[in-house]
Image: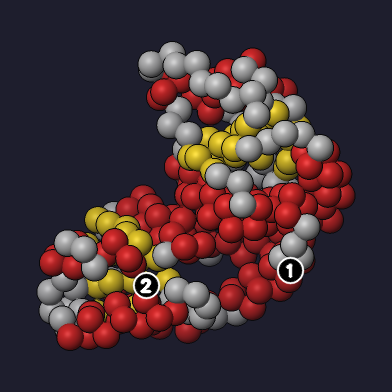
Amino acid sequence: MSLMLKEICEQPVALEQTIQAEQEKVKKLGEFLKTKDIDLIVIVARGSSDNAALFGRYLFEITTGTPVSLCAPSVFTLYNAKLKLKRALVIGVSQSGEGVDINKVLESAKNSGAFTIGITNQAKSSMAKIADETLLTHAGPERSVAATKTYTGQMLHFYMLASALSGIKLGYKKIPHFCDAALKLETEIEELVQRYVFMENCVVVGRGLNYGNSYELALKLMETCYVVAERFSSADFFHGPLAIVERRFPVILFAPSGVTKTSNIDLLKRLKELHADSFSIT
């Protein structure tokens, strides 16, 4: 078993540990933030953490009604801009908590009057020292270069924080169970992916709450399988990018039930007409 697969299999336990250790803290944090005059949420991250942040953006806007911006760290680190964030909640996300540009944004936001939160896997990290409040992903050491259990841990924290801020019960306590059930599909997945062993290019499509996951899967394909993987929203894919699809071109689609189902089915029908090789995750 590879180190990456081993850490993937550790996700149900890591997620459950995070819920048990952090849910009361998140609940109290939510109650405190409701007393502040916050009209903007800013999330700053890089890499896989940035893909988790993209999920967080959709979730916060849907549940709280508060506009969310994904921060461009270079605005702070290269252009030395001073943003007006006095009424903002700024959330930094980093597995190690040592991303220099992420931490610089947190410091600048804090100096401008924003309330800052750090989501990290390292309790003694620089991020934990800078942020007003730290939320930990209790994933244990992540030795694989490709992030897995910390990525899902970060998304879990967005669920818990969104629930605390909105008062909506999001059912996040079921997530470790769902993760465990997904891992039981390993043998089936191994058989399905044999057809893609020689894949060199593909497109990964997702929409809404799965848009960030499309970015993350594409990143994983690039960094672990050396596949050139483009990623799109299913809504955007119809406008221009669909032209790259030819016979047997691989398209991986996040296609859950729910509000995106209709547009996903429309896309699958069009891909069938083009004789693409469609693989749906549902």
Above or below, 249 against 85 in this view is: below
Above or below, 237 against 45 in this view is: below
Tag 1 residue: 171
Q: Earlier in the sequence, mark 1 or mark 2?
A: 1
Residue occupying the point 29% across, 61% down:
236
Of residues 173 and 90, the one nearer the viewer is: 90
- For badge 1, the amino acid type reads Gly
- Badge 1 element: loop
Query: Mark 1: few, some, or many residues within 10 Å (few <14, many ≥20)?
Result: few
Query: Residue 259 appears at what percent x and percent y?
Result: 50, 75
In terms of image quadrants, where is residue 67?
top right
Residue occupying the point 33% across, 67% down:
234
Residue occupying the point 43% across, 60% down:
211
- Badge 2 element: strand
Of residues 254 and 87, the one nearer the viewer is: 87
Tag 2 residue: 253
In terms of image quadrants, where is residue 105?
top right
Residue 224 visible in the shown view: no
- For badge 2, the amino acid type reads Leu
Query: Residue 120 appears at what percent x and percent y?
Result: 65, 39
